[in-house]
Image (tube, grey):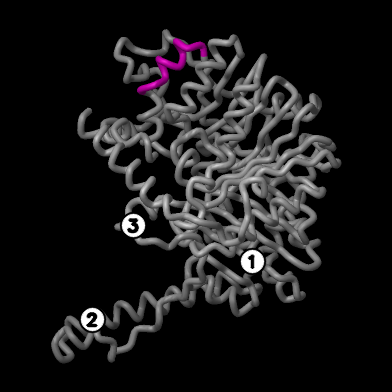
């Protein structure tokens, strides 16, 4: 316990020391530029299913006339990653200015520097956010977790989905139940400004691919005058480099365009279209964090303040959907105060079977009893496809599923849809964004109905489901979990509780 407290104090001190030298972001902006409200009508569409979310992205790209700005935390080099990339290449060839901002921490594993090299040949600008090496522990935690696709500064999609098969209901192994929102109106200008701010920050950089290995490179020559070991190392590195170049060229080439997949996406999205809510919001806000860096400092945290304000102002109900739930002291105090005031509060999250993050589940299970005692209704997503939900094939239908949506409904008349998780990374380390609509009961009802359906596909956690040991969930709640995952759960349990402030 002492070691854990000392570690937390040390990290807190390091963060405070890092940000105290901050002055400004990439653009000279104030916090108000990242918390923008409009009373003008905003056309909105909630994108609950993956096929509709992918189709809407493709539609936006295909109709773009001048600019496309896309930022994401993850971009996998898979089917959906490729179909979106090909759509962007086509628009770039038409003269549309395309900019891609990918977080370096995970995103560069998919759209790597070799693929970026090929994209630049197509006049697509590619930057990576914060390529700080991991040994610089604190700075390496600063991430851009925002997801947005904005065209012509007139229409945008924001929400929880990264780019990859599992976010658009195509994986045969694991898929996310997620949510985005499309909107069109003057508030899109705020999204464009948020993107511009992080695009121009010092942390967003162009990274070149590795140069082709040469026998004259020092790393091979210093291994002692042409030894067989140096030669083998050179040959191996050359092979890997050639494979990377070949894969990148092949992945980007329009000769490999997936026309059939494009048609399938359009067909199934048309089938799902009646389930997507479309309306107009007359009191909307877009709120975005300024990315944490030596430039932005304490002003970086804008969104969580807005969320706290709305929780504090709630009088009747709060319904939260978040894939991860590890709260800091401030969030715990605010939520428990709402519960004490009699505000009906529910949480839809994952449990050990449905989660993609075992370590988060290990930390959550240790606090579940306390939250139940405080009056929080906790729904644990089952891990199956939603009831009545059609997928592209039986392999996707039978895969494992977990919620990844980051949404909330306040007092049955206000909503939030964005990228913010209720976890320490979103509180402290990652830049996030969200769309809010206030005073619209129809929009709130539509979102609440989809959350309620996910509730019905979940288990409502009861105190009786917990063993006498408050740190353990009863076996019946993870009976579907394989032995390997259970072993990892118990291995992660100690460290997860010790370092829950950075999960």
Residue 1 coordinates in the image, percent (x, y): 22, 28
Residue 22 coordinates in the image, percent (x, y): 47, 55
Q: Is residue 165 visible?
A: no
Q: Is residue 242 magenta?
A: no
Q: Name the quadrant containing residue 407.
A: top right
Q: Quadrant of the C terminus?
A: top left
The magenta segment: 366-375
In the image, is residue 170 above or below residue 337?
below
* 139 lies left or right of 94: left
- The residue under the point 68% across, 29% down is 388
* 169 lies left or right of 44: left
- Mark 2 vs mark 3, CA separation in Å: 29 Å
Mark 3–mark 1 CB contact (< 8 Å): no
Determine whether the residue tagged by mark 2 lies in a helix, strand or loop: helix
Determine whether the residue tagged by mark 3 lies in a helix, strand or loop: loop
Q: Which residue is labeled 1 in the image?
A: 99
Residue 127 coordinates in the image, percent (x, y): 54, 66
Q: Which residue is labeled 3 in the image?
A: 134
Q: Is residue 304 visible?
A: yes
User: How many numbered marks does the figure carry?
Assistant: 3
**Residue in front for this viewpoint, 127 or 247:** 127
- Mark 2 vs mark 1, CA separation in Å: 39 Å
């Amino acid at each position: 316990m002492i070691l854990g407290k000392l570690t937390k104090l040390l990290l807190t001190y390091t963060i405070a020391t890092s940000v105290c030298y901050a002055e400004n972001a990439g653009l000279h902006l104030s916090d108000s530029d990242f918390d923008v409200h409009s009373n003008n009508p905003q056309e909105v569409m909630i994108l609950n299913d993956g096929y509709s979310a992918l189709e809407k992205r493709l539609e936006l790209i295909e109709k773009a006339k001048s600019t496309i700005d896309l930022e994401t935390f993850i971009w996998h080099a898979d089917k959906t990653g490729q179909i979106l990339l090909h759509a962007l290449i086509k628009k770039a060839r038409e003269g549309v200015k395309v900019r891609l901002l990918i977080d370096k921490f995970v995103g560069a594993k998919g759209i790597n520097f070799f693929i970026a090299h090929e994209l630049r040949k197509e006049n697509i600008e590619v930057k990576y956010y914060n390529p700080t090496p991991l040994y610089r522990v604190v700075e390496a935690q600063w991430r851009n977790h925002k997801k947005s696709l904005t065209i012509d500064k007139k229409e945008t999609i924001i929400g929880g989905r990264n780019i990859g098969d599992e976010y658009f209901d195509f994986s045969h192994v694991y898929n996310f139940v997620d949510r985005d929102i499309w909107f069109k109106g003057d508030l899109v200008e705020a999204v464009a400004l948020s993107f511009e701010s992080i695009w121009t920050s010092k942390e967003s950089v162009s990274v070149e691919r590795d140069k082709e290995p040469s026998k004259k490179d020092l790393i091979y020559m210093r291994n002692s005058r042409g030894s067989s070991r140096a030669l083998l190392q050179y040959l191996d590195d050359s092979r890997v480099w050639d494979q990377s170049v070949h894969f990148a060229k092949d992945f980007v080439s329009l000769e490999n365009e997936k026309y059939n997949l494009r048609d399938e996406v359009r067909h199934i999205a048309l089938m799902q279209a009646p389930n997507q809510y479309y309306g107009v919001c007359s009191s909307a806000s877009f709120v975005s964090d300024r990315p944490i860096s030596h430039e932005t400092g304490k002003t970086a945290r804008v969104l969580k303040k807005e969320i706290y304000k709305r929780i504090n102002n709630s009088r009747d109900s709060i319904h939260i959907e978040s894939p991860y739930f590890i709260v800091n002291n401030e969030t715990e105090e605010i939520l428990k105060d709402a519960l004490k005031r009699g505000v009906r509060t529910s949480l839809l999250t994952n449990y050990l079977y449905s989660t993609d993050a075992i370590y988060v589940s290990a930390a959550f299970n240790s606090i579940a009893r306390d939250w139940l005692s405080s009056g929080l209704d906790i729904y644990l997503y089952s891990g199956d496809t939603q009831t009545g939900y059609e997928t592209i094939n039986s392999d996707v239908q039978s895969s494992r599923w977990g919620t990844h949506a980051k949404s909330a409904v306040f007092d049955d008349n206000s909503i939030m849809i964005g990228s913010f998780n209720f976890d320490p990374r979103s509180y402290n380390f990652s830049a996030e964004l969200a769309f809010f609509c206030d005073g619209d009961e129809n929009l709130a009802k539509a979102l609440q109905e989809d959350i309620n359906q996910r509730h019905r596909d979940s288990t409502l956690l009861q105190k009786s489901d917990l063993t006498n040991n408050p740190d353990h969930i009863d076996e019946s709640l993870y009976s579907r979990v394989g032995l390997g995952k259970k072993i990892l759960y118990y291995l992660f349990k100690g460290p997860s509780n010790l370092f829950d402030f950075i999960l």
